[in-house]
């Protein structure tokens, strides 16, 4: 359990975000900070036991900028590299694919929502999100356990700034196919923060 934020600290962080800051939070910070500063957006409830749950993109979130590269198999890039290499070498020949079952299989795989595992530490609080909060990652197992709340990762705008929050701890997460893929969630958030800062500087904002 983390040390409780003082009211003064909460107000300073809230003001900083709403003036254009980007804040990444995890686990108990939802209780100590987010619910206090933005209670209409984040509510926390009972604490979870240590468990492993499924993790999937929330409905409509696959095109969100923060989800870029999060659920992309490394094999796609390998296949593309091999294909380009063969094209350059003149070894790739156009031919009809006769096996219709294989075609159907590939289509089903492409349409199937990608799923991976998410590690939840003992006593991590589960959250319910309010209006204006975008769910990025969700879990069906978590929804069943909490009887309705499925959020693993979410983001929201507060004033001129943004917040990215995850359930449990970021350092515990990885994907089966690519252990670095989940890190793209945080990387994309950092890149967005840098772009926002650059725009502010161009408009005469403070560094």
Image (cartoon, rainbow, N blue to C red):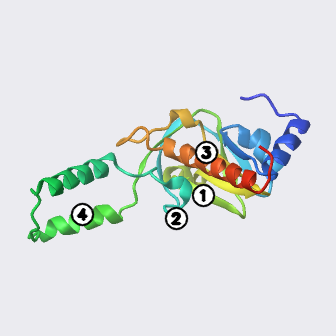
Nearer the N terminus, badge 4 or badge 1?
Answer: 4
The quarter of the image holding the N terminus is top right
For the residues carrying marks 3 and 1, which lies nearer the camera in this image? 3
Cα gap from disc 2 to disc 1, whole angstroms: 8 Å
- Which residue does the numbered mark 1 point to in the structure image? 135
- Which residue does the numbered mark 4 point to in the structure image? 106
Q: Nearer the viewer, residue 68 or 60?
A: 68
Give me the disc on residue 159: none
Q: Residues within 10 Å of mark 2 (few under 14, many from 20)?
A: few
For the residues carrying marks 2 and 3, which lies nearer the camera in this image? 3
**Residue lying at 10% horizontally and 71% vertically, measured from the top left:** 96
- Which residue does the numbered mark 3 point to in the structure image? 190
Nearer the N terminus, badge 2 or badge 1?
Answer: 2
Cα gap from disc 4 to disc 3, whole angstroms: 34 Å
Which percent across, then down, holds residue 152?
A: 57, 49
For the question of whether residue 35 can be seen, the reply is yes
Cα gap from disc 4 to disc 1, whole angstroms: 28 Å
Which percent across, then down, holds residue 66?
A: 55, 53
Nearer the N terminus, badge 3 or badge 1?
Answer: 1
Nearer the N terminus, badge 4 or badge 3?
Answer: 4
- The residue at the far right in this view is 8
Disc 1 element: strand
Q: Is residue 197 above or below residue 90?
A: above
- Which residue does the numbered mark 2 point to in the structure image? 59
Labels 2 and 3 touching (C-beta < 8 A): no
Labels 3 and 1 touching (C-beta < 8 A): no
Disc 4 element: helix
With 163 as the anchor, is 204 left or right in this view? right
Disc 2 element: loop
Nearer the N terminus, badge 2 or badge 4?
Answer: 2
Cα gap from disc 2 to disc 4, whole angstroms: 22 Å
Disc 3 element: helix
């Amino acid at each position: 359990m983390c040390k409780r934020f003082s009211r003064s600290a909460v107000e300073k962080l809230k003001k900083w975000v709403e003036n254009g800051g980007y804040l990444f939070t995890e686990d108990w910070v939802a209780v100590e900070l987010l619910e206090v500063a933005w209670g209409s957006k984040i509510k926390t409830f009972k604490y979870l036991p240590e468990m492993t749950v499924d993790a999937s993109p929330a409905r409509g979130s696959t095109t969100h900028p923060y989800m870029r590269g999060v659920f992309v198999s490394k094999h796609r890039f390998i296949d593309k590299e091999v294909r380009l290499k063969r094209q350059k070498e003149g070894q790739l020949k156009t031919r009809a694919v006769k096996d219709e079952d294989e075609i159907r299989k590939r289509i089903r795989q492409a349409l199937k929502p990608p799923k991976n595992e998410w590690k939840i530490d003992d006593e991590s609080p589960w959250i319910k999100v309010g209006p204006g909060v975008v769910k990025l990652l969700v879990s069906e197992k978590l929804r069943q356990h909490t009887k309705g709340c499925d959020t693993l990762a979410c983001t929201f705008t507060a004033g001129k700034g943004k917040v990215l929050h995850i359930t449990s701890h970021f350092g515990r997460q990885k994907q089966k196919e690519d252990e670095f893929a989940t890190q793209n969630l945080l990387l994309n958030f950092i890149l967005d923060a840098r772009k926002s800062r650059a725009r502010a500087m161009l408009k005469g904002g403070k560094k």
